[in-house]
Image (spheres, helix red, strand yellow):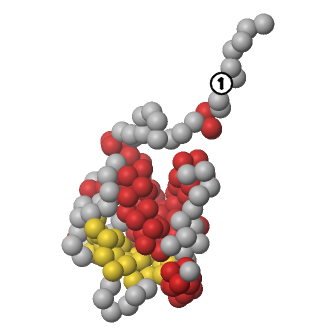
Amino acid sequence: MSGSKQRPSILDKSLSRGRTEVSLTAYALLFSEMVQYSHNRVTSVNELHNKLSELGERVGVRMVELLFVRERNYKRETKLLNILLFVKGTLWKSLFGKEADKLDRATDDERIYYLIEKEPLVNRFISVPRDKSSINCAAFIAGIIESVLNATGFPAKVTALWHKGTTFMIKFDDTVLTRDKQLEGR
């Protein structure tokens, strides 16, 4: 009998090791097809944003599974600022190879945060018709962010806006702020 070890399953291997890059050309083609497919099935820009957001939500759920279950051994964030830094750093790096450009808090409403990305990858290869210049394909990323936050216990609504590039407005539910204040009081 040989003393060979049983090889770990591919599902048990860490995602942080090995090649994690996808061809930019292939990504651009697939995303362009998703936008065209969605565009052909809606009647307004708002419906297109909602459709792209729904598609992004599917990706977000899977990213939570990958990043929290496989990479962090089921350890999830419990504080608001930590989950925002996770989205800005870890999530963004795993999706786009770099951190998001900036994270800000609204001055007038403590429930609102802004995640700023000057040139999102999803907007780089999309040409928008003149009559629909308000289309922001970053609604797909907004769906990813919203899904990640909701799946980790931080219910929020995320909207992609044109401001300083693309700004993702993250509006948290009141329960999130209440829970965060209770955790700070301990």
Q: Quadrant of the C terminus?
A: bottom right
Q: Position of residue 54 (x, y in %)?
A: 52, 67
- Answer above or below: position of 4 versus 46: above
Q: Residue at x 38, y 90 (%)?
A: 109
On the rendered structure, is 152 left or right of 116?
right
Disc 1 element: loop
Q: Quadrant of the N terminus?
A: top right
**In the orientation shown, which residue stands out farthest toward the top?**
1
Query: Label 1: which residue?
Result: 7
Q: Position of residue 80 (x, y in %)?
A: 47, 74
Q: Nearer the viewer, residue 50 or 182?
A: 182
On the rendered structure, is 13 left or right of 34?
right
Q: Residue at x 68, y 20 (%)?
A: 5
Q: Position of residue 117 (x, y in %)?
A: 28, 65
Q: Residue at x 57, y 36 (%)?
A: 13
- Answer above or below: position of 163 versus 16: below
On the rendered structure, is 41 left or right of 105?
right
